[in-house]
Amino acid sequence: MSKTFLRITAALLASTMLVTGASAETIRWARSSDALTLDPHSQNQGVTHNFAHHIYETLVDRGIDGALVPRLATEWNIKEDDPNVWVFKLREGVVFHDGNPFTAEDVVFSLDRARSEKSNMRQLHVGIAEVVAVDDHTVEVHMTGPSPLYPNNLTNTFIMDKDWSEANNVVEVQDFAAGEENYAVRNTNGTGPYTLVERDPDVRSRLVAFDGHWAEKPQIDEIIYLPITENATRIAALLSGEVDFVQDVPVQDIERLQSSDGINVTTGPENRSIYFAYRMDDAPLKSSNVTDANPFANPLVREAIHLAVDRDAIQRVVMRGQSVPTGIVVPPFVNGWTEELDAYPAPDVARARELMTEAGYPDGFTVTLDTPNNRYVNDEAISLAMVNFLGQIGIQATLASRPVAQHSPLITANETDFYLLGWGVPTFDSEYNFNDLIHTKEGSYGAYNGGLYSNPEVDAMIETLGTEVDLDKRNATIAAIWDIVQAERMLLPIHNQVLAYASRGNLEIPVHPENTVLMHSVTLSE
Amino acid sequence: MLVFVLRRLAQSVVVMLAVSLISFMIFRYVGDPVASMVGQDTRIEDMERLRQSLGLNDPFYVQFWTFVTNALQGNFGISYRLQLPVTQLIFERLPATLELAFVSVVLALVIGVGLGIFTALKRRSFWAGLIMSLSLVGVSLPTFLIGTGLMNLFAVELQWLPSFGRGETVEVTPWWRTGFLTQSGLRSLILPAITLSLFQMTLIMRLVRSEMLEVLRQDYIRFARARGLPERVINFRHALKNTLVPVITITGLQLGSIIAFSVVTESVFQWPGVGSLFINSVATVDVPVMAAYLMFIALVFVVINLAVDILYYLVDPRLRISARAGA
């Protein structure tokens, strides 16, 4: 009681008397969209996870350098006598917002909930056979086979309170397909550094620091979270001083903001690569004037396109300097990336023309290029530049531009000859890309292998990655797969996206590769 | 009378059915809702499972029938994006839109009628000429341009008014949070209301001006003038009263458009009404919200038109005679 009184008094003093620094304790944070739901296992989506990270916590977390860091688990390792079991030691003295202590039972409950039928987090936990609480602060996760990288899958799986979930009838994940809303969609009880005070979806949410949190008290006491969809409005709100921090800064506004007084812009690489891919099976292309063969199936044509693209020009002109041109479809912090793989050639149109002639297409051919127009930074403009580069070597590409909701079904349904796509790597390991982009399209593999590339040798190598415990051997396989993919020019990498954050005054927020801003780790400069 | 109303009601039901059918057909081609509901690392089989449970694999007529029967019970399903019941979402967002629309209509009426009278009476003055040419700009500039222009001037440069949102709101009833009772709420209203009302304002102004000029040429005005009545009485008691009849009709009909076309203004100013809800839903192919919103807008128009028709019927005796003769 007296503690509350002290806090109120302190807050009053801070707001009335101290002028300097007082304003920074509350941060008004604008983003382009809101969290989809507060039910932690209902959606597997970045914005939703980012919001949840303030209220709920995960066992392990992803640091700003891309490495795993402890959060609710203090240490984790593979059980000595059983390579199929991961052992997690849990942090002691942690409580939920309602005062319940955090124990191993909550972890068992949450992992089981996250891998249940209705959960969208399910695919990250398909390898689990059973989750067992050994004692109050130890949990064993039994996998169906060796899973050396499993902790990477945990960075967005949040821990809920078992008792609270049972009491409020949210043991099951919300099934919105059946037309239901559950208590956890609007109400929360996590162990996180902030508690939810106010929630108006799409409009405004308010979070305040949680007194009982196990870590050091954050410098920011209160967060007011404001989704602002329009780019121009979001930037205007920052310039007019109505918000303190803008997470999604459009590329075209970076320069203007950098030159404004009192505004800091930080940029950094995002965990997302932009690339083009082609249909590579033997059937003739649907959209081409070459009807007896598939020109893209010819390695000489792919090499010619590789040489015709001017990645630096795209970075300079289309992206206004805000991208990192690349020769491989993973950003640098992903396991498997090397500087050699990342290298890309200077454009050489003369040589590319020779290759086209050698391939038997001296006059080129026509094809349709499918591109999204609302998903990645300047996605349509990148594709337009691509059309021009291709024109120089005789390939006449027709641009077909669609919203992502219409574009991505083309790829999953194999209805495109040539397309742009962006790809992030939430596990920070190349295996993730291989599974979805390179492996032959069958079963749960190759979902986004829209080019239908198929190489049984590569498939076999990819399949060993999931269970290989010897990390050196595993990394050698990854390198070997990349060598084949790169040599065959299977994908046409363009660049890695760059993220930009803008803030006012004494706030400086570094860019996180997964675009996850954690307000409790923000320090205020004087 | 009863027959007339019943017939108009039946027509309204047909209109609503047609709108629901058309909106439903359009939404089948706006993209794959499942693609925007799940992350890119969701397995194909999980997406298929979701598609199945959402009923997206059912034949068109089954989906449409389910939609219509649910809609009749006021159930528009769950928003794919926000995962809340759509009916509840729309009712939560409606007060914001209605308040904005109300203020815009009042602004458009007061300023529009005022300027219309002024430009009609002082037809040849410099100011009337200026207002008339400015009004051309008002009609021809797109709303989002006016909105961002006002925002840059009054919010960013001068920092007088907020650039987004609704400010503080007060709960009047559980269904109605109002921005009318707080200072920040009222300040937040100014820029969006001006933006939204500008088009209607110029429309009303031009209408009042031409009607007024027309009326001033009538014989009874000349007689009044000949009788030596003061100008003020002639202009405001006799001329204006007759001018306002068509203005009121037009304004009533325009109310529907203001609600429907607040979409752009709401998205520019991040106004938390049904319009911005609709825009955000389009971007993510949130079919239940889009369908419900279109139905709602159609309902607004149908109700307004029905009311206008019935009022005309009551006011104008000629309609009653022709209805009887035609029957």
Image: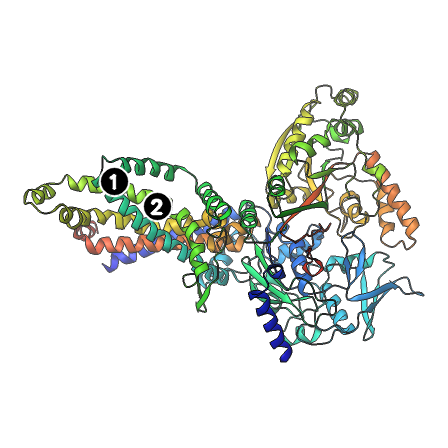
Q: Tell which subunit mark 2 falls on.
A: B
> Whole-percent x and y of residue A242?
54, 53
Task: Provide the secondary structure element on which disc 2 rests.
Answer: helix
Q: Do the residues bearing badges 1 and 2 touch, measured as CB atoms within 8 Å?
A: no
Report the amino acid beneath label 2: Gln
Taking depth in this image into account, of B300 and A49 the one nearest to the observer is A49
Residue for badge 1: B119
Kindly report the distance in space between the C-alpha atoms of the residues bearing marks 1 and 2: 17 Å
Three-letter residue code for mark 1: Thr
Left or right placement of residue A172 versus residue B67 in this view: right
Residue with the most extreme left position:
B227
Q: Residue furthest right?
A: A81
Q: Quick one: label 1 or label 2, which is nearer the N terminus? A: 1
Residue in the image at 85% along x and 37% along y? A340
- Residue placed under numbered mark 2 in the picture: B200
Q: Position of residue A270 (x, y in %)?
A: 72, 46
